[in-house]
Image: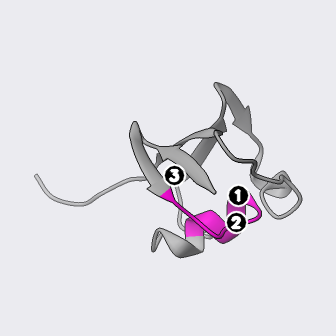
Amino acid sequence: MTLTVNGEPRQSAAATVIALLTEEGVQPDAKGVAVALNGAVVRKPDWSATALADGDAVEIVKPFSGG
C-alpha cells in the first residue's frame, strides 16, 4: 500500500502503526516518539491495534541527539 510518511510517499507492507515504526527503524519504546495518523494523534498504547490503510498520512516525531 502507499502511505505518506512525514510528507513523503512510501510503499509499505506495515499493517499497523507499530509495524510501520519498526519498518522505519524507529524504536517504539524510545522516549519522545509520537505518531499522528491522518492528523490525529495515536496514543502509544494503541499503536499495535491501529490499522493502516492505503492512502493514510502518518507523521512520526522522534527525538534526535546532537547540538
Q: Label for residue 1?
A: none
The residue where tag 2 is placed is 18
How far across and how far down the image is residue 20, in percent?
Answer: 61, 64
* Secondary structure beneath label 1: helix
Q: Which residues are magenta?
A: 11-21
In the visual, does 5 lie left or right of 18? Answer: left
Residue ID at (64%, 25%)? 39
In the rendered view, would you say 35 is above or below 44? above
* Secondary structure beneath label 2: helix
In the rendered view, would you say 32 is above or below 21? above
Residue 12 visible in image: yes
Q: In which image quadrant can residue 8 be found?
A: top left
Q: Label for residue 17?
A: 1
How far across and how far down the image is residue 1, in percent?
Answer: 63, 57
Q: In which image quadrant can residue 64 be found?
A: bottom left
Q: Residues within 10 Å of mark 2 (few under 14, many from 20)?
A: many
| Residue 12: in magenta span | yes
Asked if the residues shown at circle 2 and circle 3 are in contact, with their CB atoms under 8 angstroms apart, the answer is no
In the rendered view, would you say 44 is above or below 48? above
The residue where tag 3 is placed is 32
Amino acid on which disc 2 is placed = Ile
**Measured Cα–Cα span from mark 2 to mark 3:** 15 Å
Closer to the eye: label 3 or 1: 1
How far across and how far down the image is residue 42, in percent?
Answer: 74, 41
Q: Residues within 10 Å of mark 1 (few under 14, many from 20)?
A: many
Asked if the residues shown at circle 2 and circle 1 are in contact, with their CB atoms under 8 angstroms apart, the answer is yes
Residue ID at (42%, 41%)? 6
- Circle nearer the N terminus (3, 1): 1
How far across and how far down the image is residue 3, in percent?
Answer: 56, 48
Q: Nearer the viewer, residue 59 or 56?
A: 56
